[in-house]
Image: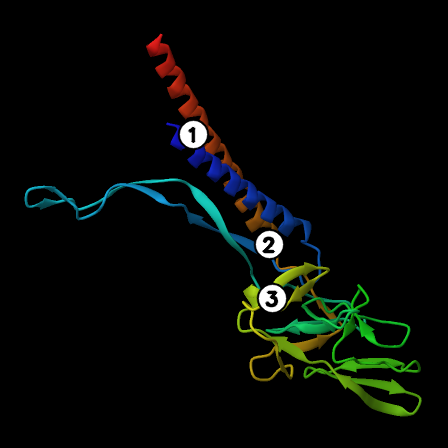
Amino acid sequence: MLRAFSTAATGMDAQQTMVDSIANNLANINTNGFKRSNVNFQDLLYLKLREAGREVSSGVTAPAGLEIGSGVRMASTNKIFTIGELQSTGNDYDLAIQGDGFFQVQMPNGDLRYTRDGAFMKDANGRLVTAGGHVVSPAVTIPQDATTVDVALDGTVSVETSTGNQVVGTIELYRFANAAGLSSEGGNLYRETEASGSAVSGTPGEQGYGSILSKYVEKSNVQMVSELVNLITAQRGYEINSRCIRVGDNMLRELNQLIR
């Protein structure tokens, strides 16, 4: 009977983790470039009271085994990299990736990070930076006298100045063999890991890389209805597991009364 207590407890803990993940998804429903997370579960070890195919009597084998599970555990969380809604902003420095790929940015210590958030700005030196101040890499510098900025589908950045039209840089995109293996660092940034593989650069619009849309930003891919359905499911799962503990407690109470 005590085994039911510990098994149900693992189920309650798993559903709590599910609620935590859903809460984070919903909290970031308006975050540019945010990708929702799913929680993956695995069953725990089994108490094998009888192996399948074991001889139960002379010449007779059991067609099925007798196993009792010990609960569930959280195996992993994975990001779902489907494209979010592309929203027109009219801002020259806003860029959205229509397809696969990430922007690369450089941290103050020189480390590289990756993002789908293309809500860029200019810093004091005219460089394109993220909302957090991280410089887009390779760096693109906008002249101070630029009157218009245009980013083509292939990432070519051209500006109109008093001396005419000129190309000032190119936005490159980066892909990973396993994007789900990237480490979420906060601030809309991801870090390369051994699981993700090394970043591979490419020209937007070519060889499987997405194209760049100027004056657009990619919104979160969180679907409120789906998250609310998952939230209700997790809540009911938590309730059912707590009821298992309550039933086990009632059975022990009945047994205790029989002994008296």
Q: Is residue 178 left or right of residue 29?
A: left
- Quarter of the C terminus within the rendering: top left
Give the residue at the far bottom of this rendering: 163
Residue at image mark 1: 244
Three-letter residue code for mark 2: Gln
Label 1: element kind: helix
Three-letter residue code for mark 3: Ile
- Quarter of the N terminus within the rendering: top left
Q: Position of residue 219 (x, y in %)?
A: 68, 62
Label 2: element kind: loop
Q: Position of residue 155 (x, y in %)?
A: 71, 82
- Work out whether residue 181 can be spotted: yes
Three-letter residue code for mark 1: Cys
Label 3: element kind: loop
Task: Note whether 199 is above or below 35 in the view shown.
Answer: below
> Which of the two discs, 1 and 3, labels the residue nearer the N terminus?
3
Q: Please name whichever residue, 160 or 14, is drawn nearer the observer in this view of the structure.
A: 14
Residue at image mark 3: 83
- Work out whether residue 237 can be spotted: no
Quarter of the image where one finds residue 69: top left
Other-residue count near label 3 (Cα within 10 Å), few / some / many at <14 / 14–19 / ≥20: some
Q: Position of residue 140 (x, y in %)?
A: 80, 80
Say which mark, if any, is on residue 223: 2
Measured in 3D between alpha carbons, the distance from the residue under mark 1 to the one under mark 2, in whole angstroms, is 32 Å
Comparing labels 1 and 2, the label whose residue is closer to the camera:
1
Give the residue at the far top of this rendering: 260
Other-residue count near label 2 (Cα within 10 Å), few / some / many at <14 / 14–19 / ≥20: few
Measured in 3D between alpha carbons, the distance from the residue under mark 2 to the one under mark 3, in whole angstroms, is 12 Å
The answer to the question of whether label 1 and label 3 lie on touching residues, with beta carbons closer than 8 A, is no
